[in-house]
Amino acid sequence: MIDLPSAHPLSARRGSPLSGRIRVPGDKSVSHRALMLGGLAVGRTTITGLLEGEDVLATARAMALMGASIAREDDDASGASVWTVDGVGVGGLAEPAEVLDMGNAGTGARLLMGVVATHPITALFTGDASLRKRPMGRVIDPLSRFGATFLARAGNRLPLALKGAAEPLPVTYRVPVPSAQVKSAVLLAGLNTPGETTVIEPVATRDHTERMLIHFGARLVRRQGDDGADVLVLSGQPELTGGPVRVPGDPSSAAFPLVAALLVPESDLLLEGVGLNPLRTGLFDTLREMGADLEVLNVREEAGEPVGDLRARASALKGVEVPADRAPSMIDEYPILAVAAACAHGTSRFHGLAELRVKESDRLAAIVRGLEACGVEATTEGDTLIVKGQGEAPQGGAVVQVDLDHRIAMAFLVLGMVSVEPVRIDDGRAIETSFPGFVDLMTGLGAHLTTEQETFA
């Protein structure tokens, strides 16, 4: 999403029970990685179900600028998108003639820096107003150890110039804080580095990169270190081979209609083909602890990723305490989980949320600010979020500032579906970065969403 000229307010109010059978957009994390590794593979990769949000399309444009041939084909029989990627091989990226504008794609930007860092090319990275505020130091530090050099704005922010290492050196890097983006950037840099690149991960984070590297033919070994940390060892300069990739439904996107179905009375919703990677299912476990009527059906595996169907029915939820070690498995779902907690009976405490301060916005601050505006008591103690659930519908009746953060935007629209008075978000443009068609999908299920300006008491 590239700095559109005007805001796009959206309102949500109580509507009908949510019912139906839906398929949410493809997993954003898997989509980014499929495009990058397909572009580094030899031969053709066919990607079915690619997320066609602005974040992923920014990655597609960037890979095309560096030599990969990327095209959208006709949808398959199920209506899923089909894309083809003809790769250039590991080490074959060309220097881009244009700036790589990553829009709002923090994952795309950080992972692509890993790819470029060990190619002998120079690339200029920028993004939209939100992405330009986000620090890149967490990947600049390890990627510099390969021999890459960076010239960035104050605070290691975009725009920045990256000069890849002509003769990259393998590194051993211990990830200082749980971050799949940092781990993945280092592993992707290791692809075009001779020898073995090692990543030590004290706390396990989502493993889409590892699964997809193996799917494309890389040699990656996981073992446990003496201190219990995961140790990942990647053999550099493999020949990756293109092939089919089916992208599962994004569990982070599924979270919004799923929680809405739990909260809106008499709802019964089936979400098909959702990714069930065990390092991404913390939200589902937490909702069950809160008393959610949530059922997993038809579990299978596609392109190395576990997939299943989710049935969610309206439920009376209770407050819960979530330990810090679960945060990496649901870090993107805390905005919508906070909405569920606001409607639950009793207090919820969510620990270990430092990562939320450096997302598309300071999500901790945004969650608290939005909930308080809607009449829900919420606060933070360090990196712990505390939400005092009312056991009934919140008052609502607020205009919530979302700071171009798609997850904050969708979370508070869900709150508006159950609150006493409507809730309006000041700008819904960012939703398209991860969940294109969100408004149409939700209204088709029975939600009442509108672009009209609401009148608040």
Image (cartoon, grey):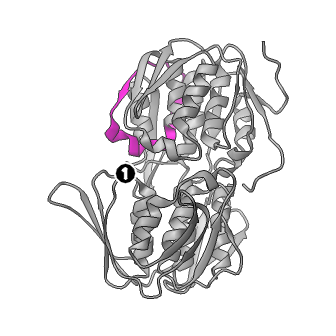
Which region shows up in magenta?
Answer: 309-333
Q: Is residue 6 above or below residue 68?
A: above
> Is 163 positioned to the left or the right of 95 in the image?
left
Q: Amino acid at mark 1?
A: Pro
Report which quarter residue 92 is drawn in.
Answer: bottom right
Neighbourhood count class around disc 1 (C-alpha, 10 Å): few under 14, some 14–19, many 20 upward: some
Q: Is residue 102 visible?
A: yes
Q: Is residue 244 visible?
A: no
Mark 1 secondary-structure assignment: loop
- Nearer the observer, 191 or 360: 360
In percent of width and height, residue 11 lies at: 76, 28
Residue at the image point whose x is 50% and y is 39% from the top: 333
Figure quadrant of the N terminus: bottom right
> Is 328 positioned to the left or the right of 232 in the image?
right
Residue at the image point whose x is 57% and y is 62% from the top: 108
- Residue bearing the label numbered 1: 178
Question: For residue 261: magenta?
Answer: no
Residue at the image point whose x is 67% and y is 76% from the top: 64
- Nearer the observer, 364 or 326: 364
Report which quarter residue 259 is drawn in.
Answer: top right
Figure quadrant of the C terminus: top right
> Is 20 positioned to the left or the right of 281 in the image?
right
